[in-house]
Image: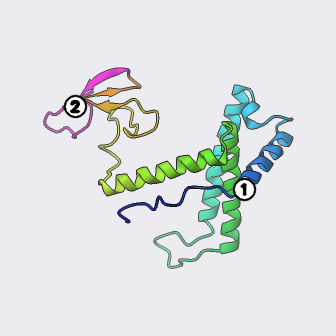
Amino acid sequence: MPEQLDRTHPVTIDPAFTRLLERQRQIQRIYLDGKTPQELPPDRKMAFLMETSAALMCEVTEAMNETGWKPWASSQHINSDAYREELADIFIFLMNLLLIDDMQMMELARLVDAKQTKNVKRQMEGYTGVTEKCPRCKAALDGAGIGCYYALDKDMYWCDKLKDWVLISRGPGTVPGQAAA
């Protein structure tokens, strides 16, 4: 793990990615009766989001199926052409998810850059995936828009979902950081 990320080169987006997103917007207008995913009424937008998310997960599985990922199997292959075609499908469905909220490629690049930085910091600080989360709602305490946080003495925390302070149980047989019921 590198001690620091190379921050000397600014994040840029190849214009081809912006063109692909715009083309996907045009394709969705054809399929969605002249509307973009963002322009759909709330019920259709949520249905589109669910269908697209399900399709994205299926495409990830299809990509995995083009590899020898199974630890109990002796093959360690990647059927490169088929694998890459599945990656293209994944990217298409990801673009559809971007279109639901009208996210542009530069915004995605900025968020990915920030998340990469956060992930490296987490790994360098011994991130467990447990103690860094709200014991009640399981939101990452360092996540964007998260209102959950520990009090200075760590005996209580504010859970934004509950809109209340919660006492952390320290009795016998309790898990550190686990909220009292």
Mark 1 → mark 2, Cα distance in angstroms: 47 Å
Helix, strand or loop under label 1: helix
**Quarter residue 61 falls in:** bottom right
Magenta run includes residue 139? no
Q: Is residue 149 left or right of residue 11?
A: left
Residue in the image at 76% along x and 31% along y? 39
The dot on residue 15 is 1
Which three-letter amino acid code belongs to the residue tagged 2? Leu
Q: What number is the disc on residue 152?
A: 2
Query: Where residue 41 sits: x, y (%)?
Result: 74, 26
Residue for point 29% across, 54% down: 126
From this view, report whether residue 148 is shown above or below residue 93.
above
> Dominant secondary structure of the magenta stretch?
loop
Residue shown at the point (70%, 41%) measured from the top left: 99
Q: The C terminus appears in which quarter of the rendering?
A: top left
Magenta-colored stretch includes residue 166: yes
Magenta stretch bounds: 163-181
Compared to residue 132, the image places residue 43 above or below, namely above
Q: What x and y, as percent, mark residue 121?
A: 36, 53
Between 51 and 19, the one nearer to me in the picture: 19
Label 1 sits on what residue type? Answer: Pro
**Sequence-first tag of 1 and 2:** 1
Crowding at dot 2, Cα within 10 Å, few <14 / some 14-19 / many 20+, comes out as: few
Contact between marks 1 and 2 (CB within 8 A): the answer is: no
**SS at circle 2:** loop
Q: Give neighbour class at mark 1: few <14, some 14-19, many 20+ (Cα, 10 Å).
A: few
